[in-house]
Image (spheres, grey):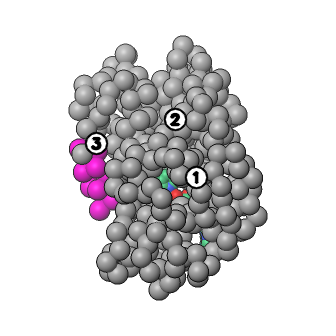
Amino acid sequence: MNAKTDIYGIIGNPIDRSFSPTLHTKMFKKYRINAVYVPFKSDNIKDAIIGLKGLSIKGVNITLPYKEKAFFFIDHADEDAQILKSVNTIKNVDGKLYGYNTDFKGFMEALRNNFNYKGKNITLIGAGGAARGVIYALYKLGIKKINIMNRTISKAENLQREFSDLIKINVYELNAKEIVGDSDMIINATSVGLKNSNMPIDIKNVEKSDIVDIIYPDTELIKQAKFKGLRTMNGIEMLVNQAFYSFKIWTGVEFDRKAALDIVKDFYI
Ligand code: NAP
């Protein structure tokens, strides 16, 4: 580090479980970029974002619980971020803050690389911030219609209204047996299974579906789906892809995603 070192980071709260400082720091080193990436725990996202300009911080990721709030404090959002009203990446160019959403892109690419999703009956579980990104990714992949299940039905209905110009959404209560049984692909975008072995649906009702979970490492849902012989995908590729696109936005460099996958796996052991 010297007087020319660029500063990047991640703003959130809590922030102590984030893998991003480890990954981006290793990638700066690998590509000989004179930069550091640090965690910024913040209680006030507005002040934190204003501080980026004051301190000439080159760029940040935004994580829970600030992705939607951050959108309102930047100077410019790209087209995808404007539709999602949510940013996870900010680039500071001469004091102007440009916002992007690389989460949805990360999911979209992971799904495209691993599954044949065309013409499939897809069910999304969840209606929070991550679910919004998944819906937008499915729309961008050309999917015309999906089912959503959520614990709080009204939140799913809000998404149904908000995305009605882009994709048809049918709303169901969580774990609706006939929908679970009838789906070709079920995507968990809730936080259920992140900290314990709970599952958002009863796997007994799943007959033929591919199971995707955006959480990493493997949740109980993924473990039991594998046990049943179903095709599965966890959240690791989404995680690496979103970091890949943030890094590219900041530096122009496309980092080695295989090396990044190894770093993430090591981090969570
Ligand atoms: P969020 O906005 O807080 O939404 C949480 C969702 O989980 C809501 O749909 C909520 O339902 C549901 N939920 C929470 N507890 C539940 C319970 N006990 N039973 C049933 N449903 C429950 O969170 P988020 O930002 O969408 O994040 C969701 C998950 O995605 C997190 O686990 C996060 O780690 C993961 N994620 C992964 C990546 C990646 O790169 N792989 C990126 C972003 C997020 P209600 O609406 O009823 O409250």
* Separation of marks 3 and 2 at Cα, in angstroms: 18 Å
Residue at x 63%, y 24% (from the top left corner) = 76
* Separation of marks 3 and 1 at Cα, in angstroms: 30 Å
**Count of number-bearing discs:** 3
Q: Which mark is residue 144?
A: 1
Give the magenta-colored segment's residue range: 259-269
Q: Nearer the viewer, mark 3 or mark 1?
A: 1
SS under mark 1? loop
Above/below status of 199 relative to 141:
below
Read off the residue under disc 3: 257
Read off the residue under disc 2: 89
Inspect the magenta stretch and tell me whether residue 14 lies in it.
Answer: no
212 or 60: nearer the viewer: 212
- Amino acid carrying label 3: it is Arg
Q: Quadrant of residue 269?
A: bottom left
Q: Are marks 3 and 2 in contact (CB under 8 Å)?
A: no
